[in-house]
């Protein structure tokens, strides 16, 4: 989201936040009016408000039209471009839509157009700004990257800032540009990704300049390679990016301070903390007790909100020391990046070391970690938990932070050896999530359950909360591939309930269908999502066959009531609904109970 002249102080920061704005006076960023076209507004997605056609409508080849403003528009030219919303304006197929994106064709980028380009782009290439009526495929790929990938991975410079620097001095950005065009091509059916992938991978394997821009490119490639299932390449580029960042000193406050430009300084802060975030998630996936940055004492400060970054109204950054000294009762809110980093530090401190802990200490550590996660969730500012702002933009950083928190809660309830097993193999070993002995008044134990299994278990609650996040108008294709493993954990919790709940639940089936839909759409971009979706679908199909064979038709009304209660729209779950971890014996932490081996799985 971008800061606009109509943004209220509450939207820009919390009422108690009095941080000094730094760099605003020097900023040359254009601050747009909060105007969104009717198609974007109806879908509750971000709109760049370009006239006569916004970028999103241009990319999707849709007719773009605007509602007349009740406040009025002073500029007669802009006013004349806005159509009455009663009916979309007619568009001539012979008239290309104006598209003033800068050209970056000075690089040798191997673009192979395999289908018709969207209206407004052509094959014309030039070393100067293109005609306003045409733009090259390179510009298209830049815009696809920033429309579909940047909000979820927001460490590059804002698009206009980056392109301005490329035009003035292109050579330092050669590798980064190759990475951007490759990732952008993944979101287009008109441009082949093969040549662009080969180009980016080739550059990444060669000699690269030691710059912040190289670190950013390697990190982008690492995330994309993971999404495409190239795990070895992803890990190698993550290690290379992290080591280069340390060699440059990006962990130190002085590195960002030396930039001399508020945009570059903020971008460097975001890049370091993005490495920390991605490194933490990778260690969690691999059950590693540490990662390259987990022991680094970082003094670089915390990133600001995305709308502050995009507008150039970048505030004085907050230090970790000051954040750690905050008053727990203070109403001051912080940036979504700050909450994400706080979550990663929590998991680094308590959750990553769990595989190395002696059995006697493990149970207490699980309880501490889950209490901290619940505290993190319920202390998020209420206005930020809405996730979608008044302009229709999704807070992608906080969205992924909340999804990661739910995923961590599920992971801690799994046996320690679970990471090496597929979903199907895990479920055949017996109920994975033991119910606690006490029941909640709002959710009694169903007497029909074959096993001592409770519908409101920590894992099921976290799985439902993860899926519920997609009620916030989030396009699944924009979900970070690095976080997709969390959807696998959510599926595991729901399938465990489906298999061992002892009765059927239409609401549970609907949530599984929603999860499969998310994985299907994300799988169009990222093979890892498609692989997980196929795995979940196969297990669910076999489970349905087994249930039909055994004539299990009893409906579970109490589970339906619980799922409905967890699915209230437009707000995070009620803090009172957060359950704390079920007590488990040491044997249960390291072993599974005897499972049913005749379930047909």
Image (spheres, rainbow, N blue to C red):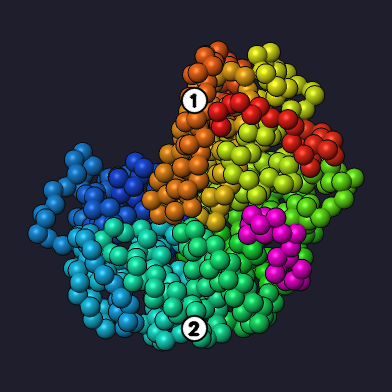
Magenta region, mostly helix, strand or loop? loop
Front in this rendered view, residue 274 or 411: 411
- Residue beneath label 1, please? 544
Are there few (<14), some (14-19), or many (20+) residues within 10 Å of tag 2? few
Contact, mark 1 vs mark 2 (Cβ under 8 Å): no
Quarter of the image containing the C terminus?
top right
| Residue ID at (75%, 32%) | 593
Question: For residue 85: magenta?
Answer: no
Work out whether 300 lies above or below 453. below
Q: Position of residue 240 (x, y in %)?
A: 59, 75
Work out whether 289 lies above or below 403. below
Front in this rendered view, residue 325 or 7: 325
One can see residue 577 in this view = no
C-alpha gap between disc 1 and disc 2? 51 Å
- Which quadrant of the view contains residue 239? bottom right
Q: Position of residue 473 (x, y in %)?
A: 44, 42
SS for dot 2? loop
Total labels drawn: 2
Of the residues tagged 1 and 2, which is closer to the observer? Answer: 1
- Residue beneath label 2, please? 206
Give the magenta part as a residue range: 281-298
Q: Position of residue 189 (x, y in %)?
A: 29, 58
- Which quadrant of the view contains residue 503? top right
Left-right relation of 70 to 94: right
Front in this rendered view, residue 289 or 338: 289
């Amino acid at each position: 989201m971008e800061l606009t002249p109509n943004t209220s102080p509450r939207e820009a920061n919390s009422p108690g936040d009095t941080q000094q704005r730094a760099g605003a006076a020097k900023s040359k960023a254009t601050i747009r009016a909060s105007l969104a076209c009717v198609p974007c507004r109806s879908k509750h997605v971000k709109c760049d408000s370009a006239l006569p056609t916004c970028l999103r409508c241009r990319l999707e080849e849709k007719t773009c039209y605007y509602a007349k403003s009740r406040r009025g528009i002073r500029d007669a030219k802009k006013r004349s471009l806005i159509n009455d919303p009663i009916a979309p304006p007619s568009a001539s197929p012979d008239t290309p839509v104006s598209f003033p994106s800068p050209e970056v064709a000075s690089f040798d980028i191997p673009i192979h157009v395999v289908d018709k380009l969207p209206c407004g782009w052509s094959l014309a290439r030039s070393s100067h700004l293109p005609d306003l009526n045409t733009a090259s495929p390179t510009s298209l790929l830049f815009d696809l990257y920033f429309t579909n990938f940047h909000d979820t991975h927001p460490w590059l410079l804002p698009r206009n800032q980056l392109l301005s620097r490329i035009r003035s001095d292109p050579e330092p950005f050669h590798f980064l540009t190759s990475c951007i065009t490759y990732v952008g091509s993944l979101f287009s059916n008109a441009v082949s990704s093969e040549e662009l992938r080969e180009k980016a991978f080739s550059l990444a394997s060669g000699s690269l300049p030691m710059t912040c821009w190289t670190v950013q490119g390697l990190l982008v490639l690492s995330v994309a390679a993971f999404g495409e299932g190239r795990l070895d390449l992803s890990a190698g580029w993550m290690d290379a990016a992290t080591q280069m960042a340390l060699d440059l000193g990006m962990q130190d406050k002085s590195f960002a301070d030396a930039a001399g430009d508020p945009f570059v300084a903020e971008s460097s802060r975001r890049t370091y903390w993005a490495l920390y975030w991605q490194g933490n998630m990778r260690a969690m996936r691999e059950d590693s007790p540490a990662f390259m940055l987990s022991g680094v004492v970082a003094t670089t400060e915390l990133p600001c909100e995305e709308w502050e970054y995009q507008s150039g109204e970048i505030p004085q950054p907050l230090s970790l020391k000051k954040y750690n000294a905050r008053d727990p009762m203070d109403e001051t809110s912080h940036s979504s990046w700050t909450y994400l980093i706080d979550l990663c530090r929590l998991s680094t401190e308590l959750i990553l070391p769990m595989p190395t802990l002696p059995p006697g200490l493990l149970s207490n550590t699980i309880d501490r970690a889950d209490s901290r996660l619940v505290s993190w969730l319920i202390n998020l500012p209420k206005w930020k938990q809405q996730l979608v702002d008044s302009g229709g933009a999704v807070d992608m950083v906080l969205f992924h932070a909340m999804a990661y928190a739910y995923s961590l809660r599920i992971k801690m309830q799994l046996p320690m050896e679970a990471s090496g097993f597929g979903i199907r193999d895990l479920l055949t070993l017996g109920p994975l999530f033991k119910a606690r002995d006490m029941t909640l008044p709002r959710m009694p134990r169903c007497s029909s359950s074959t096993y001592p299994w409770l519908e409101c278990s920590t894992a099921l609650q976290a799985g439902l909360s993860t899926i519920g996040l997609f009620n916030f108008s989030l396009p699944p294709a924009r979900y970070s591939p690095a976080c997709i493993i969390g959807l696998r954990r959510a599926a595991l919790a729901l399938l465990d309930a489906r298999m061992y709940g002892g009765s059927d639940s239409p609401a549970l089936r609907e949530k599984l269908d929603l999860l499969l839909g998310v994985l299907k759409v994300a799988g169009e971009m990222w093979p890892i999502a498609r692989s997980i979706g196929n795995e979940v679908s196969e297990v669910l199909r076999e489970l349905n066959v087994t249930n039909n064979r055994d004539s299990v038709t009893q409906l579970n009304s109490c589970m339906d009531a619980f799922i409905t209660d967890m699915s209230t729209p437009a707000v995070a779950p009620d803090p009172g609904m957060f359950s704390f971890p079920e007590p488990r014996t040491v044997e249960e932490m390291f072993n599974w109970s005897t499972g049913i081996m005749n379930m047909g799985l």
